Amino acid sequence: MNSSEYLIVGGGVVGAAIGYGLARQGLKCTLLDAHDRDFRAARGNFGLVWVQSKGIDFPEYARWTRLSAKLWPQLAKELKEVTGIDVQYEKRGGVHYCLDDHALQQRQTLLQQLQAGSDGDFSYRMLDHNELRELEPEVGPTIPGGSWSPHDGHTNPLQLLRALHAGFINQSGTYLGDHRVEQIERDADGYLLTTAKDRFHCRNLILACGLDNARLGPMVGLQQSVFPQRGQILVTERLPRLLNHPSNYLRQTAEGSLQLGDTKEAVGLDDGQDVRAMAAVAERACRIIPRLSQSRIVRGWGALRVLTKDGYPLYEHKDNAWAFSCHSGVTLAAAHALSLSVQLKNQQLEPDLKAFTANRFQE
Ligand SMILES: Cc1cc2nc3c(=O)[nH]c(=O)nc-3n(C[C@H](O)[C@H](O)[C@H](O)COP(=O)(O)OP(=O)(O)OC[C@H]3O[C@@H](n4cnc5c(N)ncnc54)[C@H](O)[C@@H]3O)c2cc1C
């Protein structure tokens, strides 16, 4: 029997960030991860560390997101020092492109509201076409404007995942891949987990296995009602610098490729691709940056988001078991690694995070 003080199920960006955060505090942790053929949002996402527009009707989430954006520079620096891996985090602010005047108007109303509820902690600028062009000289003539916020940034999500895993292992965490947890039982002093290969015991259990939280959560009395939503992303060949800022629809990576995103599709557990959706993504990107129409797409993929009913995080706790499901796991990686993990060590979540329980879904 393998035993551990903290056992984390799921090595995506949520489980790896929490695991890294616990291990850096000197706690004995084991992380059980499953297989490459799983649905793994952490390996198929867009890489934004995004604040503007987050949590308009959920102030606790807006604050949690802003805290994470503030902690991101520390996380990126620390991961570089501990692992030597550069996660290519950049924070020059982000642009949201509005495709017509109505969208521009709506954007202004939304961000005004967000700022009013932020106690002065959120700033942004609305941009007309000419102002947008000053920030992004390649923007197309039909884009009426957009918004810019200094809080936004982006990272290389694959390097992030690699660095979190390496950091976890470097700080004496035990990572076991190909260990899908099938069953969890409660015993007198903790939890007993069964995989096809082995059995594990722990005092503190953390479930962070994306869509599979819905299956494992109820085994320990935690409601984790999550469902998939597909997003498709395209990648261009490497290009000279065309964009200065990441945005909701496209971003240029450190290597020069442009990532074009993304779709929001209710297609169940199908993480494949669809030519019509990809064409729409490419067409929109070419409208925003017309020079893109001369470039080649070299890759594309579909991946499944881990969504809750209202799109906000679902953090549940009972006895010594915790479950964490969220969209925006890249954005929240710094909060998970540097703040949530400290709260978990103290066995006490801060008041703001109590708003993330399933109680909010009860009528
Ligand atoms: C198209 C797309 C674009 C996105 N863009 C962004 C973005 O720009 N910014 C942002 O912040 N977020 C973005 N996201 C969301 C982000 O990727 C997710 O929030 C995040 O990946 C969720 O992480 P996770 O660790 O919970 O789940 P996953 O990444 O799905 O990882 C789950 C892990 O658990 C393992 N696992 C599953 N079942 C078991 C089991 N029974 N036992 C053990 N291990 C198990 C899997 O193998 C996997 O490693 C995007 C997502 C998608 C799909």
Image: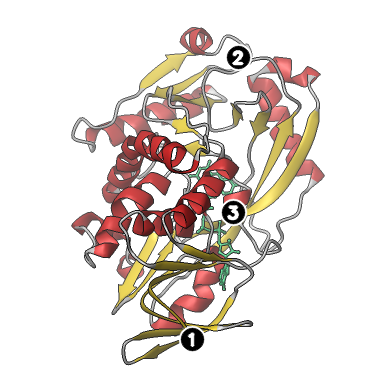
Dot 3 falls on a residue whose secondary structure is helix
Looking at the picture, does residue 7 appear above or below residue 341? below
Q: Residues within 10 Å of mark 3 (few under 14, many from 20)?
A: many
**Which sits in the foreground, 359 or 36?**
36
- Measured in 3D between alpha carbons, the distance from the residue under mark 2 to the one under mark 3, in whole angstroms, is 30 Å
Tell me the residue that label 1 is attached to. 1
Q: Nearer the viewer, mark 2 or mark 3?
A: 3
**CB at disc 3 and ligand 1 closer than 8 Å:** yes
Q: Is residue 222 above or below residue 308?
A: below
Q: Position of residue 73 (x, y in %)?
A: 37, 33
> Is tag 2's residue or tag 3's residue first in the polypeptide sequence?
3
Is the Cβ of the residue at disc 1 closer than 8 Å to that at disc 2?
no
Give the quadrant of ligand 1: bottom right
Tag of residue 139: 2
* 99 sits to left or right of 333: right
Check disc 3 and give the amino acid type: Ala
In the rendered structure, which amino acid carries the disc numbered 1?
Answer: Met
Q: Position of residue 354 (x, y in %)?
A: 25, 62
Outermost residue on the bottom side: it is 188
Q: Taking the image as drawn, is residue 176 in sight?
A: yes
Residue at 32% across, 92% down: 188
Helix, strand or loop at mark 1: loop
Name which residue type carries label 2: Val
In the image, what residue occupies the spot 71% across and 37% down?
Answer: 234
The answer for how far apart the CA atoms under marks 1 and 2 are is 59 Å
SS at mark 2?
Answer: loop
* Image spot of residue 191 (x, y percent): 40, 84
Q: Are marks 2 and 3 in contact (CB under 8 Å)?
A: no
Q: Which mark is residue 41?
A: 3
